[in-house]
Amino acid sequence: MSSALDDFGGDIIEPGAAEYGSASRSLLATGTPARILRPKSTGDVRAGVRYAAEAGLVLSVRGGGHSFPGFGTNDGGVVIDLAGLADVEVLDGHVVRIGGGATWGQVATALAPHGLAISSGDTKSVGVGGLTLTGGIGWKVRKYGLALDNVAGAEVVTADGDLVYASATEHPDLFWAIRGGGGNFGIVTAFDFVAHPTTDVFFGRIAFPAAEVATVLRGWADHLRTAPEELTSIASFANPFAGGPEAPIEIQVAFDGDDEATAAAAIDPIRRLGTVVADDVTRRPYAETLVDGMIPPPGIQLVTRSAFVDEDAVTDALGILAEVGTSSGSPVIAVRSVGGAVARVPADATAYAHRRAELMVATTTAGPKPALDAARPALDALWGRLAPHVSGLYANFLSSATEQDVAGIYPPATYERLAAVKRRYDPTNLFARNHNVRP
Ligand SMILES: Cc1cc2nc3c(=O)[nH]c(=O)nc-3n(C[C@H](O)[C@H](O)[C@H](O)COP(=O)(O)OP(=O)(O)OC[C@H]3O[C@@H](n4cnc5c(N)ncnc54)[C@H](O)[C@@H]3O)c2cc1C
């Protein structure tokens, strides 16, 4: 066994061990790694990184394990699974220190008794690490920005096994890069977030008939442009379990505040967009808005693609989506409102480059591989039509990791700056299982 592993005090799982089957896979991918390391401390993470570098093995870093391309596992390499580093500690001044392997469900539960929350995503089991390092679009995004906009600093183990603190004043280049550049620069063992006070929220779904998709979508996007930033929303349609092209269009709303009249003033214009066929918006604790992630049954794969839409392209993009979503063979379509606080952050303040986007569109196709292969031409055709109307790709909702994807995530100036930071902190590209920035 390598000398670096002599300093490793966590669990080591190898083929043949009882837990190997579950430990080797992430939520959406199977793998056959040679070793899964489960650190119990920052020192263990440092030893694990040194071991992977010395052994020259492919390294996967796993936070919550929800990556769509399956970055959290590999064949024949090492996985560093951070699930043991999941403490959530409230420090002074609403600063919350969160272990790099925590999930957003753990965070929401730990912060609720303090009346605090952090802008994150919509699912409990998603990891703080993966979601934050590439963005983080959740139910408070228009009011408090992306998850990464709320990071004040992070403890990072770099490729040589060193531990550094990245913030506005310490290693500012690294701090810039980890807010959008994904797992390219090291392993974050702890994030320091600035949390915000939270109350109950108004949350639920308002549904309209499929025939009204085009008008509802347009009216929804127009309303969100000027709605109070407390309101965040997702429009989804073409759900195969609810009728496919005939499925109602569902507008999920989250109003960040517990005053019923103010919430109604923000949400009611959506109710007036068409014929409401269901409405379950109620007041509830913020932590209860997060849902459990579903584990796909064996043999079922997910293909997700996403892109941003700026204001001038909204009409064309939504027109295409409404047409395709009400035709047979459509993927599930979800359109998330962004803007608000996200757009107020200067474009070069973080490595997340899509500040001008008003919407984020994601499509999902699920099924056994032959069904996905059969669905592919229609999916390609949809994205081909959308291409002239999108302004970039959202790394967190992409099943693929091609050069073209990386170019869509990082515009040239962002990529060049990221590559310079990569050369400084990971010159050998040890952290390569991601939407990779080459040193
Ligand atoms: C059911 C589901 C719901 C989702 N909902 C949302 C949502 O509401 N909003 C949204 O924005 N996204 C959402 N996503 C997308 C999600 O943000 C990405 O899949 C993200 O990569 C998941 O992070 P993870 O830590 O769980 O995944 P992992 O697979 O563990 O991590 C992905 C990659 O991130 C890096 N990484 C993770 N943790 C660390 C760390 N501590 N240090 C360094 N690198 C690290 C590594 O490169 C790793 O391979 C959702 C995904 C799923 C499957």
Image (cartoon, rainbow, N blue to C red):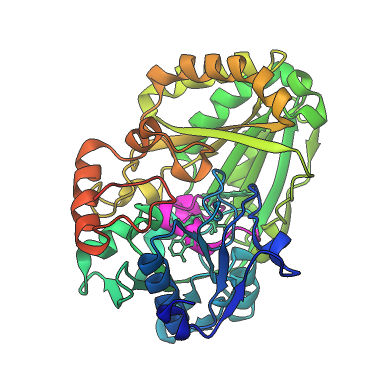
Where residue 221 sits: x, y (%)? 51, 31
Where residue 43 sits: x, y (%)? 43, 84
Which residue is more in the foreground, 345 or 388? 388
Q: Is residue 125 magenta?
A: yes
How many badges with numbers are in the image?
A: 0
Taking the view exactly as shown, the residue that stands out farthest to the front is 1
Which residue is more in the foreground, 144 or 242? 242
Could you tell whether 60 is left or right of 184 in the image? right
Where residue 323 sits: x, y (%)? 61, 13
Q: Is residue 157 magenta?
A: no
What is the quadrant of residue 192 in the picture?
bottom left
Examine the rendered structure and indicate whether residue 384 appears above or below residue 266. Answer: above
Examine the rendered structure and indicate whether residue 34 appears above or below residue 142. Answer: below
The residue located at (46%, 55%) in the rendering is 143
The residue located at (59%, 66%) in the rendering is 103
Could you tell whether 77 is left or right of 110 in the image? left
What is the quadrant of residue 382 in the picture?
top right
Where residue 203 sits: x, y (%)? 68, 52
Q: Which residues are magenta?
A: 124-144
Could you tell whether 171 is left or right of 390 in the image? left
What is the quadrant of residue 191 in the picture?
bottom left
Examine the rendered structure and indicate whether residue 438 appears above or below residue 303. Answer: below
Residue 291 seen from this side? yes
Could you tell whether 169 is left or right of 123 in the image? left
The residue located at (75%, 27%) in the rendering is 248
Residue 192 seen from this side? no
